[in-house]
Amino acid sequence: MGVVRFSVVTAFPEYFHAFLNTSIVGKAIKEGKIEVEIVNLRDFAQNSYGQIDDYSYGGGGMVIMPEPLYKALESIKSDKAYVVYPSPQGVILTQDVVEALAAKDHVILICGHYEGIDERFVEKCVDLEISIGDYVLTGGELPAMVIIDAVSRLIPGVVGKKEAVLEDSFYKGMLDYPHYTRPAEWNGIQVPEELTSGDHERTARWRMRQAALRTLSRRPDLLPRAGIRPYLSRGIYVMLVHHPVLNKNDEVVTSAVTGLDLHDISRSCMTYGVDKFLVITPLKSQRDMIHKITAHWERASKEGLNPMRSEALNLVKTFNSIEFAIMWIKRREKEKPFIVATTAKKRKGAIPWLELKRTILEQDAPLCLVFGTSWGLADEIFNQVDAVLDPILGGYGEYNHLSVRSAVAVALDRFFGSR
């Protein structure tokens, strides 16, 4: 990423003097990591009186006229310029919007004042209107500063440590954890023991857990876009069941293992931080075939051929029954896993994915997501699980006959994908 250039069009350039010469933004400008140009709108006034505004048609307050804005914009606009107008009518400024702006070469910020700016200028020249919240300010200068500050933090070298940016509130879709400094006791309140123990792993676990609990209690609305895997301290398991499953006549059968399922699901598991991909089949011949496939890619990896495929397939572990697989997880985690069955059919008591995501984060228990092959899991399995996930629906009609590979990828992305 190169130097990001900001241009600010404002009738009140004096607003920006202290902001651009102090703290992190001021340092970034001096070091040439960002460029900020302040353009005085009054230099493009309609007359010698410096007029830039007039009365609103239909009654109301003063509105900034389009011609001074247009002339100011034309004087600074580059081929790659992206024009932003801070406005109460704009999209809410979120970390996603900030990251999109950070990818631009030249961001032009148009600061309104009074009742705003002429709508014709907005229609003709503005790429995006942005609101920093549901309240009204006297002008666009403060929002422009907020946007510059938020974008600047993402530019390499502006903030000293990259980790500081990655751990910020909202960057990963979650709130930040609480912070403490010396003294260790203040007004009878102790710094949490986890932070003074000297155990870095224990400290990291505590911070992630506190971030999760804080998000759940204060901003649960953030959960849809948050990848929660880093905030879970226990293992995550995907189980692919080949018996007992149903055929199209609702008869209990054993389905065949396919190499395509093994390859695609193992790669999805690797991508989203799943600990193990458990494949259930009572047929020894099928388990032998799975071992043959994984062994082939392990040999290929040693010869330098597609080592990432071998790493993903290394997550595969076979069992002859669901019961044995659950027992293995319990021994590994020293705790009973929270078992979630998936289905393509409507079932009474099934839980919407967002509510289940909240439950998973609250419990922080080992998690096992169970997927069926053929025409779905046999009914007996649903009596043995802790929760059933609502079917995946595309939002267009009732058709939802996804391959199990697709269903696993969608489910993992909803729970563990970031934004």
Image (cartoon, helix red, strand yellow):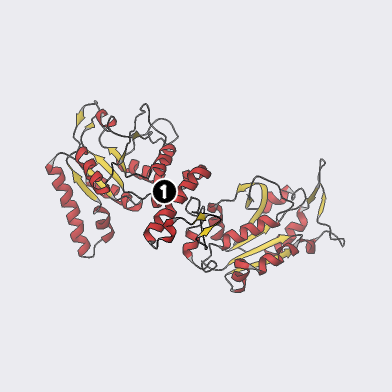
Residue highlighted by disc 1:
228
x, y percentage for residue 217? 50, 43
Secondary structure beneath label 1: loop
**How many marks do you count on the picture?**
1
Badge 1: few (under 14), some or many (20 or more) residues near its Cα, within 10 Å?
many
**Quarter of the figure with residue 83:** bottom right
x, y percentage for residue 294? 19, 53
Q: Amino acid at mark 1?
A: Ile
Residue at the far bottom: name it.
31
Q: Residue at x 84, y 60 (%)?
A: 50
Q: Residue at x 32, y 45 (%)?
A: 366
Residue situated in front as seen by the camera: 26 or 176:
176
Residue 34 against residue 187 in the figure, above or below? below
Q: Is residue 62 left or right of residue 413?
A: right
Please say whether residue 218 is visible from this viewpoint. Answer: yes
Q: Is residue 175 left or right of residue 329?
A: right
Residue 282 against residue 74 in the figure, above or below? above
Q: Is residue 355 left or right of residue 11?
A: left
x, y percentage for residue 155? 53, 65
Residue situated in front as seen by the camera: 417 or 100:
417
Q: Residue at x 44, y 33 (%)?
A: 396
x, y percentage for residue 72? 73, 61
Residue situated in front as seen by the camera: 11 or 179:
179
Please say whether residue 419 is visible from this viewpoint. Answer: no
Residue at the far front: name it.
188
**Quarter of the figure with residue 45:** bottom right
Q: Is residue 284 left or right of residue 322?
A: left
